[in-house]
Image (spheres, helix red, strand yellow):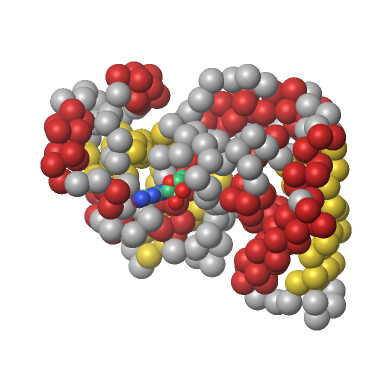
C-alpha cells in the first residue's frame, strides 16, 4: 500500500482546481474564469486498489492587499509544508514569462519532489507549446514535466502514474469513501459563490462571501437559506439585478448543482447582505471561516 500528500500550487487561474476535480472525478473545488477563485486549502483524496493520494488544492499565488489575501497566502505556505510532492501548475496556453519562472523558482526552492504540470494544452498548438516546454526543460529542481489538459481530462492519468512513482509504502490516511475534508455545508456555500463568480460583472466577485444561515435536511426537501455578502451598498443592486433576475439566476443555477451534491430536492433562499469592506477586517474574514489558526 502506497500513500502520500501532494500540494497543488501555481499562479491564479492556471487550472489547479480543475485539475483536482479531474483527478478525483468529483467536484471538490470550485472553478471560475476569474483569478483568485480558491480561497482555502481544500483536500481531495484519490484512492485506487494499491494507493491513496491526498491532494491539497491551494489559492493562486498573488500579493497581499487585504486580510483575506494574507489568509490565502498563509494557506499556500502551510500547504507546501509537510507534503511529499509538490505539483506546480502553469498555463501552457500562454508564453512562460520571467515572472512565471521567478514565482515558480521561489515556491519550489528546497523542495525535493517537484512535478511541473503544463496545463491547458488543448488551448494551444504544438508549434507554440514546443518552445515553452523547452524553457521548462532548462529549469532546475523539477523532477518531471507533465503537459496535460485538466479541462478535457487529457493526460491526467499520466500525472497520477508519475506521482505514484514517488509514493512510499505507508498507511491509508482516510477511509476510502471520503473524498474531501470539507463539510457538505462548505461545498454548498462554495457552489453558490461559484455561480455568483460566473454570473456577475468583473468588479464584484472578489468581494463576495457566502454564509449558510439555515440548513435543514430533516424533511424530504432540504431547506437552505444563505446570505451572499458584499462589500458595498452600491453593489447590492448588481447582485439582485433588474426585478431580481440576477439573484434568481444565481439561485436556480446553484440549486441544480446542490441537488446533485445532496442527491435530494432543495429549496434555496438567497439574501444579499452588506458588510462594508469585510476583506479588510480580521474579525469579518475569520467569521467567514478564513481563520489562520486553523491552517
Ligand atoms: N482551455 C482550458 N481551460 C482550462 C483548463 N483547465 C482550467 N481551465 C479554465 O481556466 C479557468 C481557471 O480554472 P481554475 O481551475 O478555477 O483555476 P485555478 O488555478 O484553480 O484558479 P484560482 O483558484 O483562482 O487560483 C477556468 O475558466 C477553467 O475552465 C484546461 O485544461 N484547458
Ligand atoms: Mg482554484
Q: 53 or 69: which is nearer to us? A: 69
Task: Give whichever of 232, 30 is nearer the camera.
Answer: 232
Which part of the image, by quadrant, shows the N terminus?
A: bottom left
Question: Considering only vertical position in the picture, is 212 above or below 267?
Answer: above
In the image: residue 135, left or right of residue 185: left
At a point 83% along the width and 47% down the height, the residue shown is 272
Residue 78 spot, x, y in % from top left: 54, 30
* Above/below status of 258 relative to 76: below
Q: Residue at x 29, y 48 (%)?
A: 123
State which quarter of the image contains the C terminus.
top right
Question: What percent of the width, then of the height, locates residue 154?
Answer: 28, 58
The number of numbered discs placed on residues in the rendered structure image is 0
Against 275, residue 17 (above or below) is below
Q: Please name the residue shown 41% across and 58% down the image.
A: 22
**Does residue 218 appear in this view?**
yes
Measured as percent of width and height from the top left, residue 30 is found at 56, 51
Q: Position of residue 281 (x, y in %)?
A: 78, 24
Q: Nearer the viewer, residue 273 or 58?
A: 273
On the question of residue 115 being in view, the answer is no
Q: Nearer the viewer, residue 165 or 289?
A: 289
35 sits to left or right of 111: right
Find residue 108 and report its image quarter. top left
Q: Left or right of 136: which side holds 211?
A: right
Taking the view exactly as shown, the residue that stands out farthest to the front is: 242
Quarter of the view holding residue 218: bottom right
Q: Residue at x 54, y 67 (%)?
A: 177
Amino acid at each position: 500500500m502506497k500513500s502520500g500528500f501532494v500540494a497543488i500550487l501555481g499562479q491564479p487561474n492556471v487550472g489547479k482546481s480543475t485539475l483536482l476535480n479531474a483527478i478525483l472525478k468529483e467536484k471538490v473545488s470550485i472553478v471560475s474564469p476569474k483569478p483568485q477563485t480558491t480561497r482555502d486549502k481544500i483536500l481531495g483524496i484519490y484512492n485506487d486498489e494499491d494507493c491513496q493520494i491526498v491532494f491539497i488544492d491551494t489559492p493562486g499565488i498573488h500579493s497581499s492587499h487585504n486580510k483575506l489575501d494574507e489568509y490565502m497566502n498563509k494557506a499556500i505556505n502551510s500547504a507546501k509544508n509537510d507534503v511529499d510532492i509538490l505539483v506546480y501548475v502553469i498555463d501552457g496556453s500562454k508564453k512562460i514569462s520571467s515572472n512565471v519562472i521567478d514565482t515558480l523558482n521561489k515556491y519550489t526552492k528546497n523542495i525535493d519532489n517537484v512535478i511541473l504540470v503544463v496545463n491547458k494544452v488543448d488551448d494551444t498548438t504544438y508549434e507554440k507549446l514546443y518552445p515553452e516546454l523547452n524553457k521548462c526543460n532548462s529549469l532546475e529542481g523539477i523532477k518531471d514535466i507533465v503537459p496535460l489538459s485538466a479541462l478535457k481530462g487529457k493526460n491526467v492519468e499520466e500525472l497520477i502514474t508519475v506521482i505514484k512513482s514517488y509514493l512510499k509504502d505507508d498507511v491509508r490516511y482516510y477511509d476510502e469513501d471520503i473524498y474531501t475534508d470539507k463539510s457538505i455545508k462548505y461545498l454548498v456555500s462554495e457552489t453558490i459563490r461559484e455561480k455568483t463568480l460566473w454570473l456577475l460583472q468583473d468588479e464584484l466577485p472578489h468581494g463576495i462571501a457566502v454564509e449558510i444561515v439555515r440548513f435543514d435536511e430533516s424533511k424530504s426537501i432540504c431547506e437552505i437559506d444563505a446570505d451572499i455578502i458584499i462589500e458595498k451598498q452600491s453593489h447590492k443592486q448588481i447582485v439582485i439585478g433588474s426585478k431580481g433576475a440576477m439573484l434568481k439566476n444565481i439561485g436556480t443555477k446553484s440549486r441544480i448543482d446542490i441537488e446533485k451534491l445532496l442527491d435530494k430536492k432543495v429549496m434555496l433562499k438567497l439574501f444579499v447582505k452588506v458588510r462594508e469592506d469585510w476583506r479588510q477586517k480580521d474579525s469579518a474574514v475569520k467569521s467567514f471561516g478564513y481563520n489562520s489558526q486553523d491552517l
